[in-house]
Image: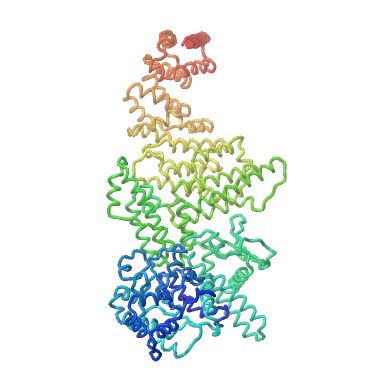
């Protein structure tokens, strides 16, 4: 069965040559016979024997058979000038043959030649390849490129060509560096001799070198048309193997055509396996012996399985795969999305069944052979493939006749599941990055590189090298920025380290990995993200157009209209599962944000709303809060969310569990913060985003209580931003707006606010929270539900602290906090507030413009009596200051222009006043408005 694949040469030998090529260890040794492949009808080059015969004729000798001595005699008789011209005349102006180009297609590390012509270097120039040309020891000493063309017998331009006897005898003296260099190449590289015969003197010289080196060296081959046992044993004894075709009657040119065709076939495994399948199928059809048929089929199965094992081997190095990475390896197949199932559909061999960009019946045949083998066997080969499918989250395989489900692997999910729940510990990448512990990250990534390199896992090695360089570049930017507060620390960190330069480093990895590594690099440099973003955006726009047509009364249908998100999810799992730091890039975040929100818009046009755990994760992790809220407003408007969201009870339970666990984990992560910054950290963003989402779920009282109790510790922390509290407000608002749900534990926020006052932890951000009425929904919901604030002891302590502040501070807390508490306070709480207001605020004389507004607030919102002489004093204040002092800073800062008439109107309209007092307030309002018109 050795040649069922229709190769001309032994496949093992071809594989060894290609392996050497992939590992940058292939050397071609080129003799005179290879140049003859460039001959034309009109241009022929003499063989060595023909050139020697010309020399013998000029020397008029016929009985000498030693070629080297004849050349030496010619040199001695005619002199150097005639000698050089005679030898030069044997070189013709030939064009490189197709075989010269074939040489370079194999990417040899070195090409060594005993030829004097320029065919090889001309080919390299024509193909624009970077090879140093070595024609002398001086060239070798000055060589800078790794790849070289070595003309070991010199050339005419250097006047150092090797031909006569002295040249060979003194070769070691004239070319000591080249001789030593070539001997070193023999020790480490696979050599293929082309254009030499068994009797070639040049080959004999080289054989003598090989004989002196260790036997434990890579293979060396001599290409010949016919196999000769005696010659083979002689050459093998000197470390060289004959490389001959199965067919022994090939012409010289056909010999080389077959050799390069085999290399070209085997280097493209799909071509080889297709040839093998066709060959075996033909034999099976003509074979009558059933046992022989079974043997043939078994042989075919083994070859097909090995083909796929080799093909999928690089993918096994990932922790999580994109489904497309698998389907691209199989080619003639398709990915289908059915809800959360990803189905790998193996296409029929019938060319009329499907139209694909790489239509090939041969490829479809081997796919079907492989899948049939998987269905019938349960061994390490099937498990290897199913592991690949599990990593790609493919849940089902479908063929033309049947489909079968794959067992889900929890082991695979562990690579991303914790991250999806935001379950971090202090030493996780995310938390180290969050705390800008770049030195720890560099150490971690460096250790990962060493570990995976030792395991020969070149995929994960590349990922961690890229992560290392990503952190290094952050430090470099900080070190180069003199004004950056981290400038000095960053300089010290990078002083003794260098980046991996991963993009260049991957070229040192095995050739068999390069295609897959280049695909990975396209992810790391975001090329694949940009492509996917563009493709998904177009698909999203098309989906929205279809939905809009239906909304307008037209008919429009597409089979995969609702599969866009299912195509998006694998990108999430791929990035998370492989620890790719590109998730922190703004372009990655924008990709996930725009596609998920566009999908929601598409559903919304159709009056539908669908969401799952991965959707929630994308919203929380990658979306901007303002964009989430912009879409959310459409759902809140008219309570549309309730009418269009029809999730199954089981799905709602799962989503609730996810949100509660994610919230708890995010709140824990906020506690890992070690750096001081007023900017929004990504954990803060996760927290504000999950608060934005929480209100859209109908929580039962126990769940609502759990949420509040989870949030409370975050609120207790020293306030550094207001966005967290604004989103607590948003959560309470949406919960009440959609479902009128809440819990008395929301009053704990008031406890924390008062505690901050008592502990003197109050800061400007807390002021902003009160100024912008961030806690207003606590009071509004409490009023609607009848919740009563009754922590009188805490309030009493807070009032004692406030009492010791300046009047302005006392007034501030009364207006911004205490009056709101009074709206929902118990009898005892309200008595404490009333006592404080009456003793410290209400009856004090008004000294600033805002004092008058504050008194009106107390009258209207607090229900306090009108202080003595207040109306008269207010009238006098307006007469004196409006419009005369309208540009006074205190007047402008108080907002009296809008706030004073607003409060007066509220009091006149809503308060149960004595008619005389109401009339007085109306008069003051009129007076104020008239005076304002004079400005």
Residue 919, relative to residue 743: is it above or below?
A: above
Q: Is residue 239 visible?
A: no
**Image location (x, y in percent) of residue 901:** 49, 16
- Residue 199: x %, y % from top left: 42, 86
Image coords of residue 446 (percent x, y): 35, 59
Pick the quarter of the image with the N terminus: bottom right
Question: In the rendered view, does 820 fall on the left or right side of 555?
Answer: left
Residue 797 relative to residue 820: left or right: left
Residue 24: quarter of image? bottom left
Q: Quadrant of residue 86?
A: bottom left
Coloured how? Answer: rainbow
Residue at point 61%, 82% (across, down): 294
Which of these two is toward me, 696 or 837? 696
- Residue 408, percent from left and from top: 54, 62
Q: Is residue 232 above or below residue 422?
A: below
Q: Is residue 452 visible?
A: yes
Pick whichever, 860 or 590, lies toward us: 590
Residue 627, placed above or below residue 191: above
The number of callouts visible is 0
């Amino acid at each position: 069965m050795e040649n069922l694949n229709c190769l001309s040469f032994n496949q093992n030998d071809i594989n060894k040559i290609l392996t050497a090529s992939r590992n940058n260890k292939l050397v071609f040794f080129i003799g005179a016979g290879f140049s003859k492949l460039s001959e034309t009808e009109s241009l022929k080059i003499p063989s060595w024997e023909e050139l020697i015969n010309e020399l013998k004729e000029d020397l008029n000798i016929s009985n000498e058979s030693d070629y080297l001595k004849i050349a030496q005699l010619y040199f001695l008789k005619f002199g150097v000038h005639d000698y050089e011209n005679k030898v030069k005349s044997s070189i013709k102006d030939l064009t490189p043959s197709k075989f010269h180009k074939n040489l370079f297609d194999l990417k040899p590390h070195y090409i060594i030649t005993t030829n004097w012509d320029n065919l090889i270097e001309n080919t390299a120039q024509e193909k624009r390849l970077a090879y140093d040309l070595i024609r002398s020891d001086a060239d070798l000493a000055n060589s800078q490129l790794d790849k070289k063309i070595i003309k070991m017998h010199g050339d005419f331009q250097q006047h150092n060509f090797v031909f006569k006897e002295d040249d060979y005898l003194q070769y070691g003296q004239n070319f000591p560096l080249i001789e030593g260099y070539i001997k070193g190449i023999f020790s480490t590289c696979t050599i293929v001799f082309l254009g030499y015969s068994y009797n070639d003197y040049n080959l004999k010289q080289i054989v003598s070198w090989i004989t002196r080196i260790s036997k434990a060296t890579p293979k060396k081959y001599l290409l010949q048309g016919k196999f000769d046992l005696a010659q083979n044993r002689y050459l093998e004894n000197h470390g060289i193997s004959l490389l001959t075709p199965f067919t022994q009657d090939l012409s010289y040119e056909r010999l080389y055509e077959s050799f390069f065709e085999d290399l070209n076939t085997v280097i493209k495994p799909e071509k080889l396996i297709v040839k093998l399948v066709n060959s075996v199928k033909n034999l099976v059809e003509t074979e009558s012996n059933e046992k022989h048929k079974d043997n043939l089929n078994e042989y075919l199965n083994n070859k097909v399985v090995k083909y796929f094992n080799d093909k999928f081997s690089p993918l096994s190095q990932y922790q999580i795969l994109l489904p497309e990475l698998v389907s691209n390896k199989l080619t003639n197949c398709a990915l289908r999305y059915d809800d959360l199932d990803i189905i790998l559909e193996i296409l029929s061999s019938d060319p009329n069944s499907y139209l694909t960009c790489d239509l090939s019946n041969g490829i479809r045949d081997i796919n079907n052979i492989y899948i049939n083998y998987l269905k019938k066997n349960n061994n390490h080969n099937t498990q290897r493939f199913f592991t690949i499918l599990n990593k790609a989250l493919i849940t089902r395989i479908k063929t033309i006749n049947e489909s079968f489900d794959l067992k889900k692997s929890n082991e695979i999910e562990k690579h991303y599941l914790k991250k999806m729940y935001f379950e971090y510990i202090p030493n996780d990448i995310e938390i180290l990055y969050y705390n800008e512990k770049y030195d720890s990250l560099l150490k971690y990534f460096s250790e990962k590189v060493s570990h995976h390199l030792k395991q020969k896992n070149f995929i994960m090695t590349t990922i961690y090298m890229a992560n290392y360089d990503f952190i290094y570049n952050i430090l470099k930017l900080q070190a180069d920025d003199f004004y950056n507060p981290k400038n000095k620390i960053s300089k010290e960190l990078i002083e003794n380290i260098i980046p991996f330069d991963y993009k260049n480093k991957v070229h040192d990895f095995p050739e068999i990995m390069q295609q897959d590594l280049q695909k990975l690099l396209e992810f790391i440099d975001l090329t694949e993200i940009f492509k996917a973003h563009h493709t998904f955006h177009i698909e999203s726009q098309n989906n929205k157009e279809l939905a809009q047509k239906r909304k307008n009364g037209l008919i429009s249908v597409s089979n995969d209209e609702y599969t866009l998100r299912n195509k998006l999810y694998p990108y999430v799992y791929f990035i998370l599962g492989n620890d790719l730091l590109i998730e922190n890039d703004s372009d990655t975040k924008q990709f996930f944000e725009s596609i998920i929100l566009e999908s929601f818009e598409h559903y919304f046009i159709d009056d539908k709303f669908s969401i799952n755990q991965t959707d929630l994760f994308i919203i929380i992790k990658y979306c901007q809060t303002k964009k989430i809220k912009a879409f959310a407003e459409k759902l809140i408007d008219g309570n549309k969310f309730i009418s269009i969201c029809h999730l199954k009870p089981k799905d709602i339970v799962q989503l609730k569990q996810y949100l509660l666990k994610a919230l708890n984990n995010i709140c824990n992560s906020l506690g890992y913060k070690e750096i001081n910054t007023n900017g929004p950290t990504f954990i803060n963003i996760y927290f504000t985003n999950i608060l934005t989402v929480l209100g859209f779920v109908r929580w039962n009282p126990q769940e609502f209580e759990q949420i509040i109790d989870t949030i409370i510790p975050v609120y207790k922390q020293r306030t550094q931003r207001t966005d967290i509290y604004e989103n607590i407000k948003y959560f309470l608002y949406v919960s009440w707006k959609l479902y009128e749900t809440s819990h008395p534990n929301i009053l704990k926020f008031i406890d924390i606010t008062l505690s901050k006052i008592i502990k003197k932890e109050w800061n400007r951000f807390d002021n902003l929270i009160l100024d912008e009425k961030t806690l207003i929904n606590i009071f509004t919901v409490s009023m609607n539900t009848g919740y009563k604030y009754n922590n009188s002891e805490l309030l009493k302590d807070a009032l004692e602290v406030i009492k010791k502040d300046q009047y302005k501070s006392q007034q501030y807390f009364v207006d911004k906090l205490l009056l709101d508490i009074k709206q929902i306070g118990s009898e005892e709480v309200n008595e404490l507030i009333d006592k404080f207001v009456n003793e410290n605020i209400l009856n004090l004389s008004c000294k600033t413009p805002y004092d008058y507004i504050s008194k009106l607030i107390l009258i209207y919102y607090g229900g306090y009596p009108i202080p003595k002489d207040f109306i008269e004093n207010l009238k006098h204040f307006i007469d004196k200051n409006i419009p005369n002092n309208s540009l006074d800073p205190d007047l402008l800062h108080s907002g009296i222009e809008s706030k004073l008439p607003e409060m007066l109107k509220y009091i006149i309209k809503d308060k149960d006043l004595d008619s005389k007092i109401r009339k007085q307030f109306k008069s003051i309002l009129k007076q104020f408005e008239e005076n304002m018109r004079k400005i």
